[in-house]
Image (spheres, rainbow, N blue to C red):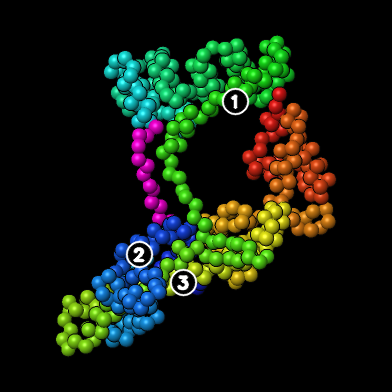
């Protein structure tokens, strides 16, 4: 028998306006400017402000737009005065099926020849038949951005048959790979592993004693070389430390990722524009918001005059009502957008001001050891905002300081207690760890266990595995791989 039950649930949903506000807060300066331009283009009721001038004629001109239309501030309009009905703009009742954290990702395109196209163009310099060219082009298409072919020859043979209708053998593919593809520029491209990549580069250089020895070591004892088992190499090849040192220097000049040398030229370089500026004035910190985050926007009075004209008109046709409804939507949207920008500015300033005062000693001195442990909740509690709001401000914003431009989220770190029971930032410990490793004897680098003892002597009692975690976060290899001859 079918049973019926009644359940009560409490759900919280964000309105479209709240979602848009969160996205505005998250945007860095340059992306915010693009969003601003887009809104101005799409909503003719929005008008940009003019720069103030020193004479009356210019001031008078500032009150009008290019068409001679007077401008007013958003607060001067009460839209509902002009319409007796209660139409609700469609943008208030509609929303896309996206969450508040979804971003609109516009991927820019880089001009110029791509990495793979450059490789294909070079195939024209080889005297090969149609079948060989088809194999070579397929191999070029299988090269990743680092310049490697990561697939087995047998798999490539199968794919050539199924996708390119080219039936060949492993020997033929191997021949085209070594005699054609691996001869392309940059040298080393088409290698199947790091060992082959380095050997290819060495063989194209002029032969010297060190290069011949380097090739021999890479071919016969690659694992020993990579793992820096220098004693085993000295015994196996019966060479001196000086000879091994010269070989090491020769190999260190090679490019382990030949593809990245080319593809890196096509990457879009993002220019960092600080969202805030912190200066020291008379021994005190002064925080300002980048003016590009505070545009002067107005609502054109031409649109409110249209509504007034409709109110004064004796006859109101259906087309007039439709037109006025459209105008009312644009005015509503313009007023909301201006209010959202003001709220965005206030949120950014309040959040960054709290961060600045929390890390006051650091911003005053620039000493990273004075950074306090700080998590998102610490700031959220101070400014009575949600943690997600603080995260949006910190994650993609930069601040210009007397010590350089910094990503705000880098000021956040967890805490641990030192030997005196005081809370210290994990970033402070990482900085000390980085300094200790930089000053170590590279012939006998410090193990994680020894690093743990040194940090304990400095007043930071942390375990060996914690040292290993911090070392990995700093992209510092283990002691064996830091060893030098």
Q: Residue at x 62, y 23 (%)?
A: 249
Which element type, helix, strand or loop, lies under badge 3? helix
Highlighted magenta segment, given as a residue range: 101-115
57 in the magenta segment: no
State the image quarter where residue 50 is shown. bottom left
Quadrant placement of the C terminus:
top right
103 in the magenta segment: yes
Q: Is residue 333 visible?
A: no
The location of residue 92, given as percent across then percent down, is 36, 72
Which element type, helix, strand or loop, lies under badge 1? helix
Q: Main secondary structure of the magenta part?
A: loop
**Crowdedness near tag 1: few (<14), some (14–19) or many (≥20) residues, C-alpha within 10 Å:** few
Quadrant placement of the N terminus:
bottom left
- First in sequence: mark 3 vs mark 2: 2
Can you identify the residue that label 3 sits on? Answer: 342
Can you identify the residue that label 1 sits on? Answer: 252
Whether 388 is drawn above or below 180: the answer is below
Which element type, helix, strand or loop, lies under badge 2? helix
Whether 276 is drawn above or below 324: the answer is above
The location of residue 466, given as percent across then percent down, is 72, 45
Check residue 97 in the rendering and tell me which mark sits there, or answer none: none
Can you identify the residue that label 2 sits on? Answer: 39
Left or right relative to 255: residue 320? left
**Crowdedness near tag 2: few (<14), some (14–19) or many (≥20) residues, C-alpha within 10 Å:** some
- First in sequence: mark 1 vs mark 3: 1
Left or right relative to 196: residue 241? right
């Amino acid at each position: 028998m079918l049973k019926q039950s009644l359940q009560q649930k409490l759900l919280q949903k964000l309105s479209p306006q709240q979602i848009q506000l969160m996205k505005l807060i998250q945007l860095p300066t340059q992306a915010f400017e693009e969003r601003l331009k887009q809104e101005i283009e799409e909503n003719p009721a929005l008008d940009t402000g003019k720069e103030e001038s020193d004479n009356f004629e210019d001031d008078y001109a500032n009150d009008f737009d290019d068409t001679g239309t007077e401008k007013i501030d958003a607060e001067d309009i009460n839209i509902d005065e002009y319409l007796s009905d209660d139409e609700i703009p469609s943008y208030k009742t509609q929303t896309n099926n996206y969450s508040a954290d979804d971003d609109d990702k516009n991927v820019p395109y880089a001009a110029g020849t791509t990495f793979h196209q450059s490789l294909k163009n070079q195939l024209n310099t080889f005297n090969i038949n149609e079948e060989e060219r088809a194999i070579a082009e397929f191999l070029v298409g299988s090269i990743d951005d680092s310049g490697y072919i990561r697939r087995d020859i047998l798999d490539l043979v199968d794919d050539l048959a199924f996708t390119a209708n080219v039936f060949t053998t492993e020997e033929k593919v191997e021949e085209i790979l070594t005699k054609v593809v691996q001869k392309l520029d940059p040298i080393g491209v088409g290698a199947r592993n790091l060992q082959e990549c380095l050997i290819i580069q060495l063989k194209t250089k002029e032969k010297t004693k060190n290069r011949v020895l380097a090739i021999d070591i890479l071919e016969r004892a690659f694992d020993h070389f990579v793992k820096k088992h220098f004693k085993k190499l000295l015994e196996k090849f019966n060479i001196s430390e000086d000879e091994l040192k010269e070989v090491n220097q020769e190999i260190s000049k090679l490019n382990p990722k030949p593809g990245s040398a080319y593809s890196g030229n096509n990457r879009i370089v993002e220019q960092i524009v600080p969202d805030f500026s912190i200066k020291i004035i008379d021994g005190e910190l002064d925080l300002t918001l980048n003016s590009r985050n505070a545009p002067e926007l107005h609502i054109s009075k031409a649109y409110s005059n249209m509504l007034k004209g409709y109110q004064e008109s004796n006859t109101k046709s259906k087309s007039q009502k439709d037109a006025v409804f459209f105008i009312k939507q644009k005015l509503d949207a313009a007023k909301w957008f201006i209010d959202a920008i003001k709220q965005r500015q206030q949120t950014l300033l309040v959040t960054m001001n709290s961060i600045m005062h929390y890390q006051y000693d650091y911003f005053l001195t620039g000493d990273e050891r004075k950074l306090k442990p700080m998590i998102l909740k610490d700031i959220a509690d101070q400014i009575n905002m949600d943690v997600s709001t603080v995260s949006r401000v910190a994650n993609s914003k930069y601040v210009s300081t007397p010590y350089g431009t910094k990503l705000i989220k880098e000021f956040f770190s967890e805490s641990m207690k030192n030997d005196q029971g005081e809370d210290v930032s994990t970033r402070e410990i990482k900085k000390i760890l980085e300094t200790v490793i930089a000053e170590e004897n590279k012939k006998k680098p410090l193990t994680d266990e020894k690093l743990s003892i040194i940090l304990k002597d400095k007043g930071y009692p942390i375990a060996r595995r914690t040292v290993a975690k911090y070392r990995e976060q700093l992209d510092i290899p283990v002691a064996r791989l830091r060893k030098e001859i």
